[in-house]
């Protein structure tokens, strides 16, 4: 696998702004991975994504797409990417199928619309006007739209926001399968469960700069506590004990507890991605600073 995107010293300033929104960030997105760009609102995530899908130009720095200068690429670029915006955009007076057939008409390569709509549970509603759809149905249709051209790279922004757990699971399974077939995904989300379940690597963006890039596993090891907490019953009451993870197999007190008490739960000190988000960015997921 090669490199899908190579971004070097990327800078961008909106015409009405006194300072840069993107302040010299550099990172790579590998072919065949799900790369998550995370950060608080206003950090520059959406601006970065808009630059990569060529909705924004006049940036400084360099971006290569599979070795080609992004600036030099023509309309063929749009044949290779699929984009799922955070806010679903459809023609509300057209049916779901009419919407998908219209958007599919822009591409030379087309996926099987029926197969995609069946997978997300919308085929039976194909003749219903989108204006009558619920929010969750619109979100699922939005994902189908992003997949219409069988893209080489998929850009997704809050892809499961507004979905119930069952439908969110379907979308996440489809994204993982797409990656396993060699597709590349650029994901932006505030839903840390999506990050934990999907992303191969993540980068945290704060105030237009990248402050940390790593895998979710390595981040959990870095910011977690090397300890094990055991909850158990003693004389009918719930009790707990914490042991160092290092050398746990030789810890006699730990061994005795397992052998002589009614153990209910055992947890390592692994931290969640939500906790890591707060630690790395200094911002809670509701957008307020610590």
Image: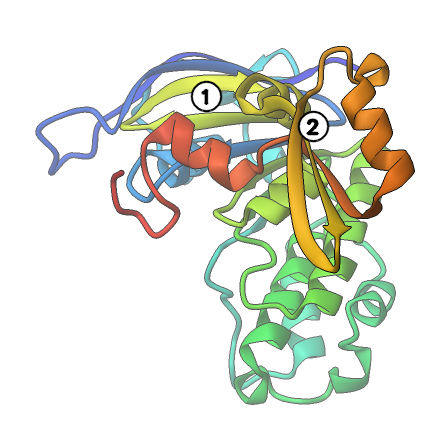
Image-based side of 63 in relation to 31, left or right: left
Residue density around tag 1, few if under 14, some if 14–19, many if 20 or more, within 10 Å: some
Q: Position of residue 216 (x, y in %)?
A: 63, 27
Quarter in which the C terminus is drawn: top left
Quarter in which the N terminus is drawn: top right
Residue 57: which numbered mark, if any?
A: none
Q: Position of residue 59 (x, y in %)?
A: 32, 22
Q: Nearer the viewer, residue 23 or 94?
A: 23
Label 1: which secondary element: helix
Estimate the spatial distance between the alpha carbons at disc 2 and disc 1, rounded to whole Å. 27 Å
Image-based side of 223 in relation to 67, left or right: left
Identify the mark nearer the N-term, 2 or 1. Answer: 1
Residue 230 visible in rendering: yes
Q: Position of residue 226 (x, y in %)?
A: 63, 20
Residue 6 visible in rendering: no
Q: Residue at x 57, y 39 (%)?
A: 187
Q: Residue at x 49, y 31 (%)?
A: 276
* Residue that label 2 marks: 200
Q: Position of residue 109 (x, y in %)?
A: 78, 47
Which of pointers 2 and 1 indicates the residue nearer the eye? 2
Residue 71: which numbered mark, if any?
A: 1
Q: Nearer the viewer, residue 50 or 250?
A: 250
Image-based side of 9 in relation to 119, left or right: left
Q: How many marks?
A: 2
Residue density around tag 2, few if under 14, some if 14–19, many if 20 or more, within 10 Å: some
Q: Residue at x 46, y 18 (%)?
A: 212
């Amino acid at each position: 696998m090669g490199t899908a995107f190579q971004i070097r010293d990327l800078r961008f300033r909106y015409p009405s702004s006194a300072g840069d929104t993107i302040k010299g960030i550099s990172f790579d997105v590998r072919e065949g991975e799900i790369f998550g760009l995370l950060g608080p609102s206003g950090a520059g995530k959406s601006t970065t994504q808009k630059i990569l899908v060529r909705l924004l130009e006049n940036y400084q720095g360099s971006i290569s797409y599979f070795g080609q200068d992004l600036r030099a690429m023509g309309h063929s670029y749009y044949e290779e990417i699929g984009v799922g915006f955070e806010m679903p955009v459809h023609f509300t007076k057209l049916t779901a199928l009419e919407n998908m057939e219209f958007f599919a008409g822009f591409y030379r390569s087309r996926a099987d619309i029926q197969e995609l709509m069946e997978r997300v549970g919308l085929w039976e509603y194909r003749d219903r006007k989108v204006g009558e759809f619920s929010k969750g149905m619109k979100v699922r249709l939005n994902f189908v739209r992003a997949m219409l051209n069988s893209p080489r790279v998929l850009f997704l922004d809050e892809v499961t926001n507004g979905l119930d757990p069952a439908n969110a699971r379907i979308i996440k399974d489809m994204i993982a399968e797409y990656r396993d077939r060699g597709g590349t995904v650029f994901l932006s989300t505030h839903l840390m469960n999506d990050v934990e379940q999907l992303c191969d690597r993540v980068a945290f963006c704060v105030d237009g700069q990248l402050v940390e890039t790593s895998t979710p596993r390595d981040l959990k090891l870095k910011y977690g506590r090397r300890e094990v907490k055991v909850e158990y019953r003693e004389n009918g009451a719930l009790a707990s004990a914490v042991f160092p993870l290092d050398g746990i197999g030789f810890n006699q007190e730990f061994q005795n507890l397992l052998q002589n008490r009614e153990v209910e739960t055992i947890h390592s000190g692994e931290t969640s991605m939500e906790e890591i988000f707060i630690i790395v960015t200094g911002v809670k997921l509701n957008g307020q600073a610590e």
